[in-house]
Image: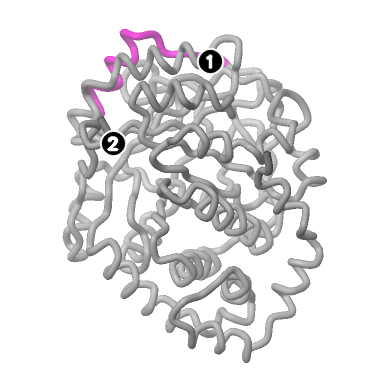
């Protein structure tokens, strides 16, 4: 059966990059004049030639987001279950060759973390772990979900790529959404960053969203790790992937996020710098291309940027995040996957959102809807 790989192989990285950087002002104006845009228009809107039109893009982005989602921002928090990992990835603090203390939460420790998150007001939790298939595997995830399922209306996961059957088991257990990042769609560069472990298999990771879609998961989140390669070209391929997924698994919802490479223990610096203006342009391009796409922003970003971007196209935000297992209560000093930038509390973020004229949404889904 065909997967995204069959579509991906029809495109050439260098050709797409040349088109992006060869975009003209006239092409930008033509794309902005449309009311319905396609992937070719997305390519144009992420080009350097579109930057002088950013104010116009932002205004339309605001109106489209308000029309489709209202003035609401959903709140969520990541819960890191483990920093054990069998992969060597040069940009990640959890990398196998990083000689640090490893930790995987036990049931009692998960409950301690839950108590803190519930006290902070969260009803949407994102379970995250390193990729250690022997210890942090499907059975561990199912057990963790069983521990927390009565405390959260919405459970999402961001873990190693699994089989279709394993995603079906997660779906049956009550998982609402699955996030998976290709990291970079540049196949040769991918090999340089992922030197050992199952994650070094580019094709297996590329086909992961297909397995999630076939398993019937309610929502799928895709992203590229911004900083490994040229962000514009990687973002085109991420949009190509989203476009394929929406057409193939049309009953599923989709989201996109923007993990800019952040400092972490024992990691490389970004090869490609993406500034705030660039990220604003990318967010606008996604919304102008796809009105239905949910757009998420994490605490990787700085306070001022997060405050300002509320008005443009964001539909969900994390707050008070800890990127280490046990970071909320059990073991605050365990290794972080990366440093966060916005360290304000969830209540502070909620106040900022409310002051901007938006409604803070702690709960917008219940498992009973899908039963």
Magenta segment boundaries in residue numbering:
101-117
Q: In the drawing, does residue 79 fall left or right of residue 261?
A: left
Query: Callout 1: helix, strand or loop?
Result: loop
Q: Does the magenta stretch include residue 145?
A: no
Reply above or below: 152 against 255: above
Mark 1 surroundings within 10 Å by alpha-carbon count, few (fewer than 14), some (14 through 19), many (20 or more): some
Mark 2 surroundings within 10 Å by alpha-carbon count, few (fewer than 14), some (14 through 19), many (20 or more): many
Q: Quadrant of residue 199?
A: top right
Tell which circle, 1 or 2, labels the residue nearer the N-terminal end: 2
Q: Where is residue 131 in the image (x, y as percent from the top left)?
A: 59, 23
Q: Position of residue 322 (x, y in %)?
A: 39, 32
Reply above or below: 363 against 82: below
> Which of 284/250 is in front?
250
Which residue occupies 66% across, 31% down?
266
Q: Disc 1 marks which residue?
A: 137
Q: Disc 2 marks which residue?
A: 124
Q: Where is residue 9 in the image (x, y as percent from the top left)?
A: 77, 52
> Which of 353/205 is in front?
205
Query: Callout 2: helix, strand or loop?
Result: strand
Identify the disc placed on residue 276: none
């Amino acid at each position: 059966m065909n997967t995204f790989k069959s579509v991906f192989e029809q495109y050439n990285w260098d050709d797409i990059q040349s088109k992006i950087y060869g975009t003209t002002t006239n092409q930008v104006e033509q794309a902005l004049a449309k009311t319905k845009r396609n992937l070719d228009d997305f390519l144009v809107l992420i080009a350097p030639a579109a930057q002088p039109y950013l104010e116009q893009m932002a205004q339309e982005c605001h109106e489209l987001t308000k029309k489709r989602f209202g003035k609401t921002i959903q709140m969520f928090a990541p819960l890191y279950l483990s920093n054990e990992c069998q992969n060597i990835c040069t940009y990640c603090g959890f990398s196998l060759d990083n000689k640090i203390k490893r930790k995987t939460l036990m049931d009692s420790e998960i409950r301690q973390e839950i108590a803190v998150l519930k006290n902070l007001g969260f009803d949407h939790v994102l379970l995250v772990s390193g990729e250690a298939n022997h210890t942090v595997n499907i059975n561990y995830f199912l057990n963790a979900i069983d521990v927390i399922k009565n405390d959260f209306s919405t459970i999402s996961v961001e873990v190693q790529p699994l089989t279709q059957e394993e995603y079906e088991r997660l779906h049956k257990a009550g998982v609402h959404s699955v996030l998976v990042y290709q990291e970079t769609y540049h196949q040769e560069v991918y090999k340089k960053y992922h030197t050992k472990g199952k994650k070094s298999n580019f094709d297996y990771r590329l086909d992961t969203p297909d397995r999630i879609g076939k398993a019937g998961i309610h929502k799928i989140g895709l992203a590229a790790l911004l900083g490994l390669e040229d962000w514009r070209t990687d973002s085109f391929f991420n949009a190509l992937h989203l476009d394929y997924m929406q057409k193939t698994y049309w009953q599923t919802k989709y989201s996109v996020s923007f993990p800019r490479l952040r400092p972490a223990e024992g990691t490389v610096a970004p090869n490609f710098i993406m500034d705030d203006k660039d990220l604003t342009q990318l967010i606008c391009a996604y919304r102008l291309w796809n009105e239905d796409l949910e757009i998420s922003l994490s605490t990787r970003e700085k306070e001022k940027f997060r405050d300002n971007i509320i008005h443009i196209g964001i539909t969900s935000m994390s707050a008070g995040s800890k990127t280490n297992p046990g970071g909320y209560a059990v073991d605050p000093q365990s290794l972080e996957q990366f440093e966060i930038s916005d360290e304000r509390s969830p209540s502070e973020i909620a106040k900022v959102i409310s002051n901007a004229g938006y409604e803070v949404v702690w709960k917008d889904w219940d498992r009973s809807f899908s039963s």
